[in-house]
Image (cartoon, rainbow, N blue to C red):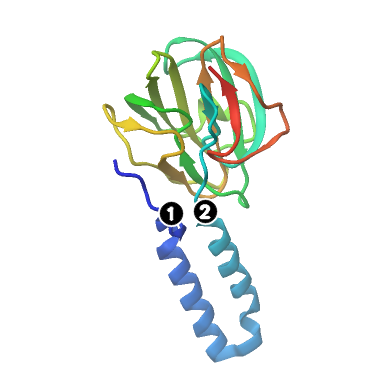
Amino acid sequence: MKNYPHPIIAREGWFYIIISFAVSSAVTYKWGIWSLPLWLISLFVLQFFRDPGRVVPDVEHAVLSPADGRIVVIEKTEDIYGKREALKISVFMNVFNVHSNRSPVDGKVESVHYFPGKFVNADLDKASLENERNALIIKTQNGQTVTCVQVAGLIARRILCYVSGGEILQKGQRFGFIRFGSRVDVYLPLSARPKVAVGDKVYATETVLAEL
Protein backbone atom coordinates (compact mmCIF):
# COMPACT_ATOMS: atom_id res chain seq x y z
CA MET A 1 0.00 0.00 0.00
CA LYS A 2 1.37 3.42 -0.91
CA ASN A 3 1.55 6.13 1.71
CA TYR A 4 -1.71 8.03 1.79
CA PRO A 5 -1.09 11.71 1.01
CA HIS A 6 -2.52 13.96 3.70
CA PRO A 7 -5.15 16.16 2.02
CA ILE A 8 -6.20 17.82 5.35
CA ILE A 9 -9.67 16.23 5.05
CA ALA A 10 -9.81 12.40 5.01
CA ARG A 11 -11.07 10.85 1.80
CA GLU A 12 -13.44 8.69 3.88
CA GLY A 13 -15.41 11.83 4.72
CA TRP A 14 -15.69 13.50 1.32
CA PHE A 15 -19.11 11.98 0.55
CA TYR A 16 -20.58 12.91 3.96
CA ILE A 17 -19.16 16.44 3.84
CA ILE A 18 -20.51 17.13 0.36
CA ILE A 19 -23.97 15.81 1.27
CA SER A 20 -24.17 17.71 4.56
CA PHE A 21 -23.06 21.02 3.03
CA ALA A 22 -25.38 20.55 0.04
CA VAL A 23 -28.36 19.94 2.32
CA SER A 24 -27.45 22.91 4.54
CA SER A 25 -27.10 25.17 1.50
CA ALA A 26 -30.46 24.07 0.10
CA VAL A 27 -32.22 24.68 3.43
CA THR A 28 -30.53 28.07 3.76
CA TYR A 29 -31.75 29.05 0.30
CA LYS A 30 -35.33 28.12 1.22
CA TRP A 31 -35.63 28.90 4.95
CA GLY A 32 -32.68 31.16 5.77
CA ILE A 33 -31.65 31.28 9.43
CA TRP A 34 -33.63 28.12 10.24
CA SER A 35 -30.82 26.18 8.60
CA LEU A 36 -28.37 27.06 11.43
CA PRO A 37 -28.65 23.64 13.19
CA LEU A 38 -27.80 21.94 9.90
CA TRP A 39 -24.73 24.13 9.45
CA LEU A 40 -23.56 23.16 12.95
CA ILE A 41 -23.92 19.50 11.97
CA SER A 42 -22.00 20.15 8.76
CA LEU A 43 -19.16 21.79 10.67
CA PHE A 44 -19.06 18.83 13.06
CA VAL A 45 -18.80 16.41 10.14
CA LEU A 46 -16.04 18.53 8.62
CA GLN A 47 -13.96 18.56 11.82
CA PHE A 48 -14.49 14.84 12.40
CA PHE A 49 -12.91 13.93 9.07
CA ARG A 50 -9.88 16.22 9.37
CA ASP A 51 -6.67 14.34 8.62
CA PRO A 52 -3.57 16.44 9.37
CA GLY A 53 -0.09 15.33 8.42
CA ARG A 54 2.14 14.19 11.27
CA VAL A 55 5.90 14.21 11.93
CA VAL A 56 7.53 10.93 13.01
CA PRO A 57 9.74 11.44 16.10
CA ASP A 58 13.35 10.35 15.78
CA VAL A 59 13.33 7.89 18.70
CA GLU A 60 15.01 4.52 18.27
CA HIS A 61 12.83 1.46 19.12
CA ALA A 62 9.79 3.71 19.69
CA VAL A 63 6.22 2.43 19.49
CA LEU A 64 4.11 5.34 18.29
CA SER A 65 0.48 5.97 19.06
CA PRO A 66 -1.73 4.61 16.24
CA ALA A 67 -4.51 7.09 17.03
CA ASP A 68 -5.40 10.39 18.62
CA GLY A 69 -7.19 10.16 21.95
CA ARG A 70 -6.74 9.32 25.61
CA ILE A 71 -4.94 6.41 27.27
CA VAL A 72 -7.53 4.27 29.07
CA VAL A 73 -5.63 1.02 29.71
CA ILE A 74 -2.04 0.00 30.44
CA GLU A 75 -1.90 -3.58 31.66
CA LYS A 76 -0.37 -7.01 31.25
CA THR A 77 -2.87 -9.33 29.62
CA GLU A 78 -3.28 -12.04 26.98
CA ASP A 79 -2.88 -11.07 23.35
CA ILE A 80 -5.46 -13.47 21.88
CA TYR A 81 -4.43 -12.50 18.35
CA GLY A 82 -0.70 -13.12 18.77
CA LYS A 83 -1.29 -15.95 21.29
CA ARG A 84 1.04 -14.65 24.00
CA GLU A 85 1.18 -12.64 27.19
CA ALA A 86 1.64 -8.98 26.36
CA LEU A 87 1.61 -5.40 27.56
CA LYS A 88 -1.60 -3.78 26.36
CA ILE A 89 -1.97 -0.02 25.83
CA SER A 90 -5.39 1.25 24.74
CA VAL A 91 -6.23 4.61 23.15
CA PHE A 92 -9.86 5.77 23.31
CA MET A 93 -11.02 8.14 20.56
CA ASN A 94 -14.04 10.39 21.10
CA VAL A 95 -15.96 12.05 18.26
CA PHE A 96 -13.73 15.14 18.41
CA ASN A 97 -10.47 13.26 17.83
CA VAL A 98 -8.81 12.62 14.48
CA HIS A 99 -9.81 9.08 13.45
CA SER A 100 -7.08 8.16 10.97
CA ASN A 101 -5.11 5.13 12.15
CA ARG A 102 -1.36 4.99 11.63
CA SER A 103 1.23 2.26 12.07
CA PRO A 104 2.93 2.26 15.49
CA VAL A 105 6.13 0.61 14.21
CA ASP A 106 8.17 -0.25 11.14
CA GLY A 107 7.54 -3.83 10.14
CA LYS A 108 5.87 -6.48 8.03
CA VAL A 109 2.16 -7.23 8.39
CA GLU A 110 2.13 -10.94 9.11
CA SER A 111 -1.66 -11.25 9.12
CA VAL A 112 -4.91 -9.30 9.39
CA HIS A 113 -7.93 -10.68 11.28
CA TYR A 114 -11.45 -9.22 11.23
CA PHE A 115 -14.00 -10.10 13.94
CA PRO A 116 -17.67 -9.07 13.81
CA GLY A 117 -19.14 -8.09 17.16
CA LYS A 118 -21.11 -5.65 19.29
CA PHE A 119 -20.96 -1.85 19.48
CA VAL A 120 -20.74 -1.13 23.22
CA ASN A 121 -19.01 1.99 24.52
CA ALA A 122 -15.36 1.76 23.38
CA ASP A 123 -14.28 3.31 26.69
CA LEU A 124 -15.19 0.05 28.46
CA ASP A 125 -12.62 -2.73 28.86
CA LYS A 126 -15.00 -5.38 27.48
CA ALA A 127 -15.09 -3.55 24.13
CA SER A 128 -11.66 -5.03 23.33
CA LEU A 129 -13.12 -8.53 23.19
CA GLU A 130 -16.82 -8.02 22.44
CA ASN A 131 -16.95 -5.25 19.84
CA GLU A 132 -16.39 -5.42 16.11
CA ARG A 133 -12.62 -5.25 15.59
CA ASN A 134 -9.78 -5.67 13.14
CA ALA A 135 -6.34 -6.89 14.25
CA LEU A 136 -2.99 -6.39 12.50
CA ILE A 137 -0.10 -8.58 13.63
CA ILE A 138 3.14 -6.78 12.74
CA LYS A 139 6.64 -8.22 12.94
CA THR A 140 9.29 -5.55 13.46
CA GLN A 141 12.71 -5.57 11.84
CA ASN A 142 14.32 -6.87 15.04
CA GLY A 143 11.84 -9.75 15.35
CA GLN A 144 9.42 -8.26 17.90
CA THR A 145 5.67 -8.78 17.51
CA VAL A 146 3.32 -5.79 17.79
CA THR A 147 -0.44 -6.32 17.53
CA CYS A 148 -2.56 -3.30 16.60
CA VAL A 149 -6.33 -3.70 16.95
CA GLN A 150 -8.95 -1.29 15.61
CA VAL A 151 -12.08 -1.53 17.77
CA ALA A 152 -15.50 -0.13 16.84
CA GLY A 153 -17.39 1.91 19.43
CA LEU A 154 -20.91 2.81 20.50
CA ILE A 155 -21.49 5.04 17.47
CA ALA A 156 -18.85 3.70 15.10
CA ARG A 157 -20.27 1.36 12.49
CA ARG A 158 -17.41 1.01 10.04
CA ILE A 159 -13.81 -0.09 10.50
CA LEU A 160 -11.65 0.53 7.43
CA CYS A 161 -8.30 -1.19 6.93
CA TYR A 162 -6.24 -0.81 3.77
CA VAL A 163 -3.44 -3.32 4.35
CA SER A 164 -3.19 -7.10 4.15
CA GLY A 165 -0.73 -9.79 5.13
CA GLY A 166 2.72 -9.50 3.58
CA GLU A 167 2.74 -5.70 3.23
CA ILE A 168 5.44 -3.51 4.76
CA LEU A 169 4.46 -0.62 7.03
CA GLN A 170 6.51 2.34 8.13
CA LYS A 171 6.05 4.21 11.40
CA GLY A 172 3.30 6.77 11.02
CA GLN A 173 2.01 5.29 7.76
CA ARG A 174 -1.74 5.58 7.44
CA PHE A 175 -3.36 2.13 7.33
CA GLY A 176 -7.01 2.68 8.20
CA PHE A 177 -9.86 4.75 9.59
CA ILE A 178 -12.74 4.26 12.06
CA ARG A 179 -15.88 6.34 11.73
CA PHE A 180 -17.32 8.10 14.80
CA GLY A 181 -15.86 7.16 18.19
CA SER A 182 -13.80 4.04 18.89
CA ARG A 183 -10.48 2.76 20.29
CA VAL A 184 -7.22 1.17 19.23
CA ASP A 185 -5.47 -1.46 21.36
CA VAL A 186 -1.73 -2.09 21.02
CA TYR A 187 -0.23 -5.32 22.37
CA LEU A 188 3.53 -5.25 22.97
CA PRO A 189 6.19 -7.65 24.31
CA LEU A 190 6.27 -7.74 28.11
CA SER A 191 9.76 -6.22 27.94
CA ALA A 192 8.38 -3.00 26.41
CA ARG A 193 8.78 0.14 28.54
CA PRO A 194 5.65 2.37 28.66
CA LYS A 195 6.19 6.09 28.11
CA VAL A 196 2.60 7.16 28.83
CA ALA A 197 0.16 6.87 31.73
CA VAL A 198 -3.58 6.27 31.99
CA GLY A 199 -5.38 9.54 31.32
CA ASP A 200 -2.68 10.98 29.07
CA LYS A 201 -3.77 12.66 25.84
CA VAL A 202 -1.92 11.23 22.84
CA TYR A 203 -1.58 12.01 19.15
CA ALA A 204 -1.20 9.53 16.30
CA THR A 205 2.41 9.20 15.14
CA GLU A 206 3.67 12.09 17.30
CA THR A 207 3.30 10.46 20.76
CA VAL A 208 5.64 7.66 21.83
CA LEU A 209 3.60 5.02 23.69
CA ALA A 210 6.51 2.77 24.62
CA GLU A 211 10.01 1.65 23.71
CA LEU A 212 10.85 -1.91 22.68
Across and down, in percent, residue 87 comes to 57, 15
Residue 6 got which mark?
Answer: 1
Residue 205 got which mark?
Answer: none
Residue 42 can be seen in this image:
yes
**In the depicted structure, whether residue 163 falls above or below residue 106:** below
Choose between 6 and 198: the one closer to the eye. 6
Specify the amino acid type for callout 1. Answer: His
Choose between 189 and 205: the one closer to the eye. 205
**Mark closest to the chain's N terminus, 2 or 1:** 1
| Left or right of 140, for residue 92 | right
Residue plotted at (40% across, 14% down): 142
Q: Residues within 10 Å of mark 2 (few under 14, many from 20)?
A: few
Disc 2, disc 1: CB below 8 Å? yes
Across and down, in percent, residue 187 comes to 51, 20
Residue plotted at (49% across, 71% down): 20
Across and down, in percent, residue 104 comes to 48, 31
| Left or right of 144, for residue 182 | right
